[in-house]
Amino acid sequence: MTGTDLDALADLLAGPVEPAAHGLLGCLLSAGGVTVRLTEVEAYAGTAGDPASHAYRGRTPRNAVMFGPARHAYVYFTYGMHWCVNVVTGVEGEASAVLLRAGEVIDGLDAARARRPAVRRDVDLARGPARLCATLGIDRSAYGLDLLADGAVRLRPAPDPVPDAAISAGPRVGVTGAHDVPWRFWLTGDPTVSAYRRHVPRARR
């Protein structure tokens, strides 16, 4: 990797969220002695017409980092038990981020297995956003980190850029609004990509 590669990734993340999401596929995310190659991501815009975004209703203490600057980590807790990590994108002041949904463990396999001993297949270690964080040991302490710096959580460019022909797109998973916006992107046919589940509202009693 050269400084030019890192600069190109920084420029990509400073731009619109959809191409940033495309460009994150194949990138390397390292934390806790484990490195994964990103195989699935989801794009989320801010207050301008994306009701599935955490920033749709404006800035809060929880989502403040989504408003920039780009390349920082937005980490949140969900379902009272799981952490998920996003990469902030776009122009400062206009919230957007890419949820890192899945990856292939390419280094630190023993550490990854130790964190998730119940997982039988290595392809399932980081298959889904909560599993990815668990495998890498990412939690609230990563909130706001500059992912392109040499810190505890590091994002690096893809060693081999992914061609557009190798990328599939479809609806985002489990969102409560804008269900059919095709902003989930994944490496076609990759076994580490998570299953699609559309959000089903709970019936009122």
Image (spheres, helix red, strand yellow):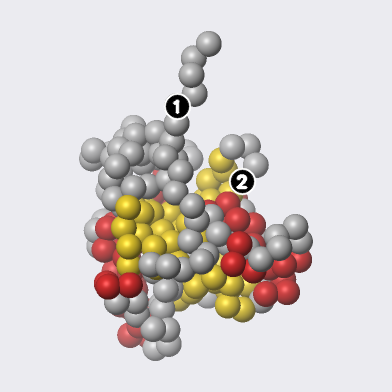
Q: Is residue 110 above or below residue 71?
A: below
User: Of 160 and 32, which appears nearest the observer?
Assistant: 160
Tell me, yes or no, if residue 55 can be seen here. no
Q: Quadrant of residue 135?
A: bottom right
Q: Amino acid at mark 2?
A: His
- The reply to whether discs 2 and 1 touch (Cβ–Cβ < 8 Å) is no
Residue at (29, 42) in percent of width and height: 180
> Residue 125's x, y, as percent?
63, 63
Residue 169 placement, left or right of 63: left
Number of marks in the rendered image: 2
Q: Is residue 170 above or below residue 202?
A: below
Q: Is residue 32 above or below residue 170?
A: below
Residue at the limit of the structure toward the front, as seen here: 189
Residue under circle 1? 201
Q: Quadrant of residue 105?
A: bottom right
Secondary structure of residue under mark 2: strand
Residue at (72, 71) in percent of width and height: 111
Residue 150 placement, left or right of 51: right
- Are there few (<14), some (14-19), or many (20+) residues within 10 Å of tag 1? few
Q: Earlier in the sequence, mark 2 or mark 1?
A: 2
Residue under circle 2? 82
Q: Amino acid at mark 1?
A: Pro
